[in-house]
Image (cartoon, grey):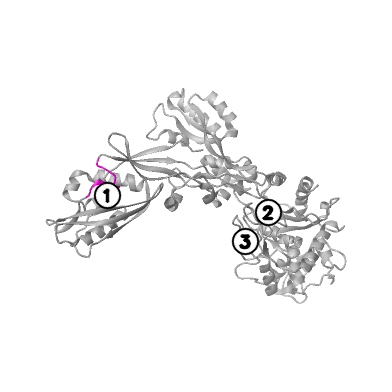
Amino acid sequence: MKKPSVFITFSIVGLFLAACSATTPEDSIETYIENWEDRNYEAMYQMLTEDAQQAITEEAFVERYENIYDGLVNDFSIEASYPEEFSGENQESISINVSMNTLVGPYEFEESLPLVLNQEEEEAWEVNWDHHLIFPQLGEDDTVDYQSSTQQRGEIFDQEGQGLALNGQVVDLAIVPNRFENEEEEIAELAERLNRSEDSIRQILEQGWVQEDSLVIIGQLPESELEMVEDIHEDVPGFTYQMGEGRVYPFGEAAAHLIGYIRPISAEQLEELAEEGYNQQSLIGQTGLERIKEEQLRGTPGGEIFIVGSDGERKDTIVEQEAVDGDNVHLTINMDIQEALMNELDGEPGTAVALHPQTGETLALVSSPSYDPNFMTVGLSSYQREELEEDEAEPLLNRFYNRFSPGSTMKAVTASIGLESDTLNPEDTMDVPGHEWQPDDSDWGSFHVRRVTDPNGAVDLFDAMAYSDNIYFAQAALALGEEQMQAGAELFGFGETFEYEYPLQTSLLTGENGFQSEIQVADTGYGQGEILVNPVHLASMFTTFVNEGTMIRPVLDQDEETGQIALEPVSSETANLVDETLENVVSSEIGTAGSLQRDGHSIAAKTGTAEVGEDTLGWVVSYDRDEPSLLLAVMQDGVGSGDVLPIIDHIYGQFLD
């Protein structure tokens, strides 16, 4: 449905450019065109003939060009066609072609640019300007009008058709100044109840156009706040409200980082995007998919630029374009799973990714804590934004976009690389007593690899995965060495831009300078060191063990083809063996994820607790082996993996049983 058209009337005046003496018509034309294209209208005016300047003042000339070219034209260019030789008379006429990109599409016209030789001014050639040089149809007493027609922004839906970003209603908050009974007290009460500063409200009321009986919009709120707004309306005489159209996000915080929000375009954005048809009234995606899918969602604005005669009647249409609504976006996201994971994190810092491990469909992308995009799109007060930005839990931080130390979840990858490189035999055992180890005759100083549990005997690959034995996987990494470890990790996608609809940070095995020590190689084997992994990438790596060595490319948009191979990092034999070790993490009596055992399901999992300075990151990656339709990767900040296991268990209880 189209919004009501908006009319802007521009008074028209002359067109051209700057003053500069020249000895030939061509020199003058080139200077004039250069000034025109530089929008140097004052300089253009100085190049007009005396007759043209008597017909229009410099102020009116400049104002008309600014109204039309700066108001309706995003960019333009002028080309002159010169004769093989000039006539030698005191008057010449040069053909010019003007091409422009207006707010409603491209427009082009040809005109003759008349020149007159001014012999008193060092024989300068001057432009005998007239109104038709702005638009050929334009007369002296005509004006140019612009009528816009607004396109409908495309909407975003989950896999079940639930709306995640919709065109709906918002509440416009307003003040009518002459209704105040006690202005000072009422503004103070409004500021307190709307969580705004008094100064921000007064600044709006002090705008030059505001009259005593004006309806002054001071902000917006989502429709969910209507009851609160009605209460304020009853208590504050000068305050009122009305329903308006706006962008609404029905799931609020649960999908905020994924979907993002739109806001009025900023001055910096407008400067960059003006050529694409944006204007000062445009709304644009600022974060999330609203920004990523901006081109698809936005559509094409329409409108008409036309000439109106002195009698007020429409004369000619210069250019017009119909508005084209944006396209809807249908995601693979399952909002039931998304909300359930968000509820499980319960506002604590963390992230969660859910994939269908065989199709690659992204079922959930969660970042916690979050914010309500309904308030972001209608505008936060400076106080509210400051409160969000200074919150230690960082609700504005998109955690599934970022990368983190993966802890012991990396052991599944280390085992895979070792098996493929024949440096790891799953049947060989390691017997290291106690909780600490370093190589004999090493130069490690006081540094030791530390394990949580002493197995009190020899361990093979299955035991080491179940115990999550740091010493075993440190030795596995050292056996691989730097080059094989790096090469194997690259086969899993480390260091590569991850192909995904939502841009993500790249997973890194080391810093820019590679491995710096033998200790770092050992640490990397069990997920410490400098290794950083993106959560979506981590979940994708575990699809390798579901699909017999094939890593499935994750998809987010239903228009994308599913089940596509991203990488093939290991053989089916290696993948199946690692899959069995991950099942042992759950089924074994010594397994760190034993709490995930479920009747009727064969669950595989890997836990991990990463130590990052004084912080702790708890990880669990898990999937159902028999009916692999849900793979979960969950990280919570400030806790160990044992505190994350109940989240996985609860999600399985809802979506597997």
Which-is-in-front pick, marks 1 and 3?
A: 1
Tag 3, which secondary structure? loop
Residue 525 in the image: x percent, y percent?
A: 73, 67
Which-is-in-front pick, marks 2 and 3?
A: 2
Which of the two labelled residues, at mark 2 and mark 3, occupies the earlier sequence position?
2
Residue 549 in the image: x percent, y percent?
A: 74, 65
Vertical placement of residue 420 versus 412, above or below: below
The amino acid type, in three-letter code, at marker 2 is Glu
Q: Which residue is mark 1?
A: 133
The amino acid type, in three-letter code, at marker 1 is Leu
Seen at 47% across and 29% down, the residue is 175
User: Can residue 134 be found in the magenta stretch?
Assistant: yes
Question: 209 or 152: nearer the eye?
Answer: 152
Q: Which secondary structure is most common in the magenta stretch?
A: loop
Residue 361: mark: 2
Residue 498: mark: 3
Residue 268 in the image: x percent, y percent?
A: 44, 51
Q: Is residue 550 left or right of residue 461?
A: left
The amino acid type, in three-letter code, at marker 3 is Phe
Q: Furthest residue to the bottom?
A: 441
Q: Residues within 10 Å of mark 2 (few under 14, many from 20)?
A: many
The residue range painted magenta reads 129-140
Which of the two labelled residues, at mark 1 and mark 3, occupies the earlier sequence position?
1
User: Can residue 260 be found in the magenta stretch?
Assistant: no
Q: Is residue 242 visible?
A: yes
Q: Is residue 229 left or right of residue 212?
A: right
Answer with the quarter of the image where residue 418 lies.
bottom right
Q: Is residue 613 left or right of residue 284?
A: right
Tag 2, which secondary structure? loop
Residue 400 in the image: x percent, y percent?
A: 64, 53
